Image: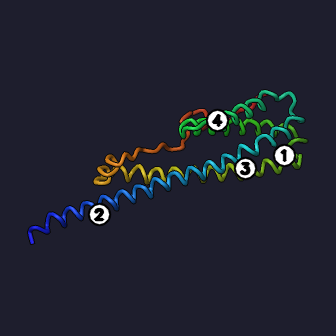
């Protein structure tokens, strides 16, 4: 009977390791899925911006700097690859889009343009989707990061090389502020 006790303990440890490893894999996959949901919404956002710029261009000839800032921000956002870089680029894009819409308010013809109204509505819907996707992603990152730090999961996480994931957050204080438009 005593001969089987070490085998039972070893079997229990192996089973625990496998179950813990699989649960960490599942959590990591959920983080990756949440990131891909953000990516889908950001792609939609990036696709809408050139149409928005084209509609606004004809009305806002002397607001060239605002339009160029949006184009520059979109380019940076599409080229960013790391989560932290992508978050910073997307936050910059959000602030430039806010500036654009603040300027649009000063152009009644543009504000009433059906294409602009439709694009603005689509972009607003997309911004809401991005916001929800960010929230979902950050929730999944929190669950995952917590799981790999908890005892005894941290043993399996360190042995299997699970690494902390980055949150998608606003780090630049100026991106939290409402843009001011002055003429």
- Choose the circle earlier in sequence order: 4 or 1: 4
Does residue 27 lie above or below 87 as drawn? below
Q: Nearer the viewer, residue 108 or 75?
A: 75
Residue 145 coordinates in the image, percent (x, y): 41, 49
x, y percentage for residue 40? 65, 50
Q: Which mark is residue 179?
A: none
Left of 1 or right of it: where is 75?
A: right
Whole-angstrom CA distance, mark 2 to mark 4, is 44 Å
Circle 4 crowding by C-alpha within 10 Å: few under 14, some 14–19, many from 20: few
Q: CA distance from mark 4 to mark 1?
A: 26 Å
Q: Which residue is mark 3?
A: 124
Task: Single out the mark in the foreground, 2 or 4.
Answer: 2
Q: Nearer the viewer, residue 131 or 33?
A: 33
**To which residue does mark 4 refer?**
79
- Give the image location of residue 25, x and y in percent: 42, 55
Q: Which mark is residue 15?
A: 2
Q: CA distance from mark 3 to mark 2?
A: 49 Å
Q: Provide the secondary structure element on which disc 3 rests.
A: helix
Answer whether labels 2 and 1 touch (C-beta < 8 Å).
Answer: no
Rendered view: 160 above or below 75: below
Q: Earlier in the sequence, mark 3 or mark 4?
A: 4
- Image coordinates for residue 171, horizontal then vertical, percent: 53, 36
Q: Is residue 65 above or below residue 39?
A: above
Query: Is residue 139 rendered to the left or right of residue 6?
Result: right
Residue occupied by mark 1 = 116
From the viewer's side, name the closer residue of 64 and 173. Answer: 64
Instruction: Tell me which corner region of the image, top left, top right, bottom left or bottom right, holds residue 180.
Output: top right
């Amino acid at each position: 009977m005593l001969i089987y006790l070490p085998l039972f303990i070893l079997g229990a440890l192996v089973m625990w390791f496998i179950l813990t490893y699989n649960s960490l894999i599942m959590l990591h996959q959920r983080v990756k899925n949440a990131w891909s949901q953000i990516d889908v919404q950001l792609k939609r956002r990036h696709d809408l911006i050139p149409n928005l710029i084209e509609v606004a261009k004809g009305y806002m000839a002397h607001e060239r700097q605002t339009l160029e800032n949006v184009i520059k921000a979109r380019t940076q956002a599409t080229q960013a690859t790391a989560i932290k870089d992508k978050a910073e680029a997307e936050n910059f894009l959000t602030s430039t889009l806010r500036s654009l819409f603040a300027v649009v308010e000063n152009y009644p013809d543009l504000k009433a343009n059906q294409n602009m109204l439709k694009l603005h509505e689509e972009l607003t819907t997309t911004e809401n989707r991005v916001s929800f996707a960010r929230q979902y992603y950050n929730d999944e990152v929190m669950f995952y990061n917590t799981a790999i730090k908890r005892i005894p999961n941290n043993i399996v996480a360190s042995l299997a090389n699970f690494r902390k994931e980055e949150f998608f957050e606003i780090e630049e204080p100026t991106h939290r502020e409402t843009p001011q438009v002055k003429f």
